[in-house]
């Protein structure tokens, strides 16, 4: 049994040596064919046939981003990166349709955008990476710089939405309070005009004294006016005082609403930074697609493998045919010249 295994191993080793000898025998043919395909690959992947694309990369971490569900802040950022309004802004600003000769339909434009702009999560560091391809290296760099700006603005608008709703509610409440204050002031004015009931400030006291003739140095008392005011105070005084207190309360409430409005408005007008850039993009001088050398090497290896197989198959077949002919000729010679 061990003898059989040793024999099989020897046969296997002989076959390998035979294959190597065939490849060595045909090396010039194989190398010539491989060289032709290598040059052809480099030629047909040159800018004469394929428009080269250049790549710019930007990477960033989320900064104070609150996810809307169970996703991590980084994954939430990835969802925002795929937002249609960001895509539409890039496509429109950098004129994708004309520059790439696309038909004016959503599918072709979206496919081109997805082919040129890749968003993925770095599994080692957990940051977001955006790779931008474009036939102009400067535009590729500009787009890579533009996307984080649009993304930050989108998150900012999303965060500010709740503040904007609160701001609108407070503004409506302030307007209502101002309307109530105006109405209350009109009531107090009517008390003064119609009933001579002036708001009891220091100035109002002096006006009343002058009206009645009871101010210092005066010995004249307007009894008719005094009786009229006494009657007005008795009939309208409590209402005038209540209206005055209502005015003070309304002004206090309005001031409180205004303070809350100002506090919320700070969150609306301030600028937010939700992204921490860790890798800034730059214009690349080396094309990212197509990789002519890489393609040529892959094609050359494939051609080398196929060519070697064909030559081994051909030489083994020819060798087997010659061996068969030699055996036939030997038998024929023995038949013709028997011992």
Image (cartoon, rainbow, N blue to C red):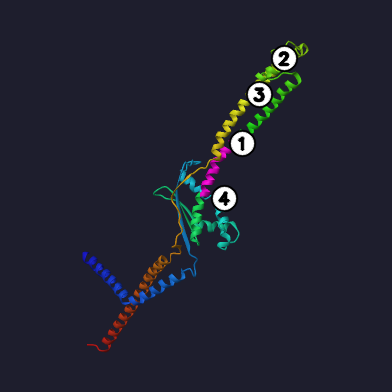
Residue annotated with mark 3: 247
Spot the residue most to the bottom: 337
Residue annotated with mark 1: 168
Find numbered disc 3 in the image and state the secondary structure of the residue it sits on: helix
Q: Nearer the viewer, mark 3 or mark 2?
A: 2
Q: Nearer the viewer, mark 1 or mark 4?
A: 1
Residue annotated with mark 4: 85
Q: CA distance from mark 4 to mark 2?
A: 67 Å
Q: Nearer the viewer, residue 78 or 57?
A: 57
Find numbered disc 4 in the image and state the secondary structure of the residue it sits on: helix
Judge from the rendering whether residue 292 lies leftward or rightward of residue 28; answer left or right.
right
Q: Nearer the viewer, residue 13 or 221?
A: 221
Q: Nearer the viewer, residue 113 or 311?
A: 113
Spot the residue most to the right: 224
Residue annotated with mark 2: 233
The segment highlighted magenta reads 149-167
Q: Nearer the viewer, residue 309 or 252?
A: 252
Q: Compared with residue 47, is residue 180 higher up or lower down, i.e. above or below?
A: above
Q: Earlier in the sequence, mark 3 or mark 1?
A: 1
Task: Find residue 227 and report its horizontal and vertical position in percent.
Answer: 76, 11
| Contact flag, marks 3 and 2 (Cβ < 8 Å) | no
Identified at 40% across, 48% down, the residue is 125
Crowd class of label 1 (few under 14; some 14 to 19; many from 20; radius 10 Å): few
Identified at 54% across, 38% down, the residue is 267
Q: CA distance from mark 1 to mark 4?
A: 25 Å
- Examine the residues drawn in magenta and state their main secondary structure: helix
Q: CA distance from mark 1 to mark 2?
A: 42 Å
Which numbered tag is attached to residue 319?
none
Q: Nearer the viewer, mark 4 or mark 3?
A: 3
Judge from the rendering whether residue 15 lies leftward or rightward of residue 90; answer left or right.
left
Residue 201 shows in the view: no
Q: Nearer the viewer, mark 3 or mark 1?
A: 3
């Amino acid at each position: 049994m061990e003898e059989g295994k040793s024999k099989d191993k020897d046969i296997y080793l002989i076959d390998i040596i035979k294959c190597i000898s065939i490849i060595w025998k045909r090396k010039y043919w194989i190398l010539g064919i491989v060289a032709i395909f290598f040059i052809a690959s480099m030629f047909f992947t040159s800018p004469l046939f394929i428009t080269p694309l250049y790549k710019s990369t930007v990477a960033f971490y989320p900064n104070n981003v609150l996810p809307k569900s169970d996703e991590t802040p980084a994954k939430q950022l990835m969802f925002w990166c795929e937002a249609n309004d960001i895509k539409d802004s890039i496509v429109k600003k950098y004129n994708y349709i004309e520059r790439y000769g696309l038909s004016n339909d959503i599918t072709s434009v979206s496919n081109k955008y997805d082919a040129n702009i890749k968003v993925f999560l770095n599994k080692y560091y957990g940051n977001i990476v955006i790779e931008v391809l474009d036939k102009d290296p400067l535009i590729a760099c500009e787009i890579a710089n533009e996307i984080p700006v649009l993304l930050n603005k989108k998150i900012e608008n999303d965060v500010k939405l709740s503040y904007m709703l609160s701001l609108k509610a407070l503004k409506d409440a302030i307007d209502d309070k101002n309307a109530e204050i105006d109405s209350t002031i009109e009531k107090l004015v009517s008390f003064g005009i119609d009933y001579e009931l002036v708001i009891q400030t220091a100035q109002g006291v002096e006006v009343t004294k002058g009206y009645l003739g009871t101010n210092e140095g005066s010995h004249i008392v307007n009894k008719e006016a005094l009786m009229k005011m006494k009657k007005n105070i008795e009939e309208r005084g409590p209402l005038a005082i209540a209206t005055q207190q209502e005015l003070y309360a309304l002004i206090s409430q309005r001031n409180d609403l205004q303070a809350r409005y100002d506090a919320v408005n700070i969150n609306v007008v301030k600028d937010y930074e939700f992204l921490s850039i860790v890798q800034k993009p730059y214009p690349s001088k080396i094309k990212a697609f197509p990789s002519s050398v890489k393609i040529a090497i892959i094609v050359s290896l494939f051609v080398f493998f196929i060519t070697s197989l064909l030559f081994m198959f051909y030489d083994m077949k020819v060798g087997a045919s010659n061996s068969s002919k030699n055996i036939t000729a030997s038998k024929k010679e023995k038949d013709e010249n028997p011992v």
